[in-house]
Image (tube, rainbow, N blue to C red):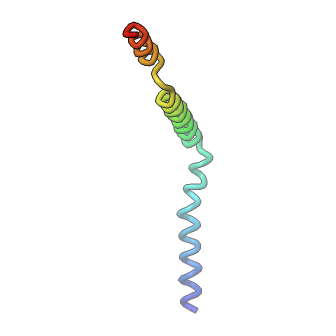
Amino acid sequence: MSNIKGIASAFVLSSLFLSSFAMAEESQTFVTQNATRATAYDQYQSEMTAKAQDAAQPPQTSISASQSRIEKDS
């Protein structure tokens, strides 16, 4: 019988503890912070994508400069 009371009290305490987190998600401050994090993450992703695309492209100026040197040497 005491085992059932212990389980029930643990369940009630955990419900009370978790209910504060559930209410925090509905607060305006939480929504604002979440939106700010999402915006920062999107900006970071776009910067990383741009850097990856820049790194994947071969440098255009060095190829044309080396080709012109080869043509002058010939």
Image location of residue 19, percent across then percent down: 59, 59
Question: Against 64, is 41 above or below?
Answer: below
**Which is more toward the observer, 31 or 64?**
64
- Can I make out residue 43 in this image? no
Residue 29 falls in image quadrant: top right
**Which is more toward the observer, 16 or 69?**
69
Image location of residue 21, percent across then percent down: 55, 55
Image location of residue 70, percent across then percent down: 40, 13
- Can I make out residue 54 in this image? yes
Split into 4 quadrants, where in the image is the N terminus? bottom right
For the point 47% across and 30% down, the residue is 55
Q: How many marks?
A: 0
For the point 56% across and 41% down, the residue is 34
Question: Against 63, is 17 above or below?
Answer: below
Image location of residue 62, percent across then percent down: 41, 17
Question: Against 71, is 16 above or below?
Answer: below
For the point 53% across and 32% down, the residue is 49
Extreme residue toward the right, this view: 26
Extreme residue toward the top, this view: 72
Split into 4 quadrants, where in the image is the C terminus? top left
- Is 53 placed left or right of 74 in the picture? right
**Which is more toward the observer, 30 or 59?**
59
**Which is more toward the observer, 32 or 46?**
46
